[in-house]
Amino acid sequence: MPAAAAPLRVAILAESYLPYLSGVTVSTNALARGLGAAGHHVLVVAPRPAGGAAPASAGSAGPEPAYAWLPSYQPPAPAPAGYRIPWPMPSAALRAAAEFAPDVVHAQSPFVSGLMARRLARRAGAPLVFTHHTRFGDYRHYFGPLARPGSAAVDAYLRAFWAGCAAIVAPGPELADEIRARLGVRHRPLVRTIPTGVDLHEIRALPRPDVRTAAGWPAEAVVVASLGRLAPEKSVDLLVDAFALAAGVDPEMRLLLVGGGPSEAALRDRGTRADMAGRLHLSGQLPRREAISLIRGADLFAFASRTETQGLVLAEALAAGLPVVALDGPGVRDSVRDGVDGVIVPAEPAADRTVRLAAAIGALAADHPRREALAAAAGSGADRFDAKRRVEEVLALYRELLARPG
């Protein structure tokens, strides 16, 4: 067993990875680079990018880790373009991972790469840690008539996978409580809440572009921004409908949607309707630095997703100095301090959810002094999201597991 202060050898196995951008790939890259910056040896075992492209960086601080590339393929729709997953087969990458002789194996998915991680951990005699990034049940709408039986099967599989881990990392406390409850009393791996951190120095150093000129909007426009995957599970349609209601009262408001996804075409069509014409600008998919820089040019950030484990984009928006209006849901209260750096809108009753969100967006857009006060609190309070702190918490968990007998 390594000495208490000795550098650790950590193998991180991922189901998807850069250059494909998502909350999971950003989190995985942040962990790998953060561990490297702390002096530890890191091997990322991940699907090979299409065409042998370099993974590049998601903007996280720290050295580039070593890689072992798994044979991979592009899954069919609804998987987005550029999303690669590994083939479940022996490979040179898995042999390299075994030769790496990790002290800790950290899985980022419970599926193909998670099973690989479990085998590697057993072979190396190392604890298996798993970060549960995704609320898989919230994606059942992609599976049509198979949604209900498929959801039940995934739920049973997850409980079995969790039970075989030494520890489970949940990015938010609500998810951690759900995992403990679903595991029951018979299986008790450690379950810890450790959110993904953000590189505060980099975000604060990003420029603030003139989004009004770029979008062809007037200088007096109040810009509401949102960042993330444009997909049904992110409730972007609800956000746009709420904005349209608010803009009906305040015609100076404009909406900037940063990101791409399966709903992008429908949202562009939505922007041609009378209540949104000239008020909606979609950036399309952008590199992460450009995306965060773009929202820095807005006046406030709006968020309606209810399928988050943490809501990483909320931390990024607050670190960028934007006040937030967010519909209450998983992960929201982990980031937003209601009345301090943002406004949390009750999600129930669902029947008038859109109206309540519209009222909150409109009220903050119209109140410049309050926006400035919330923005100042967002920037000054963002140290709680610091990536170094989060990596230290992960390392403390690793040490705790390694100190256990056997």
Image (cartoon, rainbow, N blue to C red):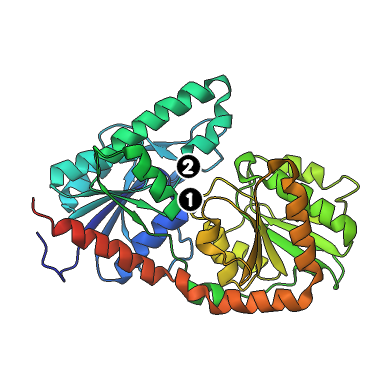
What's the residue at 61%, 45% (across, down)?
234
Nearer to the camera, 239 or 29:
239
Image: 169 above or below 73: below
Crowdedness of circle 2 by 10 Å Cα count: few (<14), some, many (20+)?
few
Say whether residue 102 is left or right of residue 235. left
Res. 320 image quadrant: bottom right
Nearer to the camera, 82 or 230:
230
Say whether residue 344 is left or right of residue 394. right
Amino acid type for the residue under numbered disc 2? Arg
Q: Secondary structure at mark 1?
A: loop
Q: Secondary structure at mark 2?
A: loop
Give x and y (percent) for residue 71.
35, 38
Res. 395 image quadrant: bottom left
Amino acid type for the residue under numbered disc 1? Thr
Whether residue 87 is visible, yes or no, is no
Give x and y (percent) for residue 211.
75, 67
Q: Are marks 2 and 1 in contact (CB under 8 Å)?
A: yes
- First in residue order: circle 2 vs circle 1: 2
* Quarter placement of the N terminus: bottom left
What's the residue at 63%, 44% (across, down)?
261
Give x and y (percent) for residue 139.
54, 36
Residue assigned mark 1: 309
Give x and y (percent) for residue 164.
24, 39
Residue assigned mark 2: 135
Res. 233 image quadrant: top right
What's the residue at 48%, 65% (across, down)?
59
Nearer to the camera, 35 or 380:
380
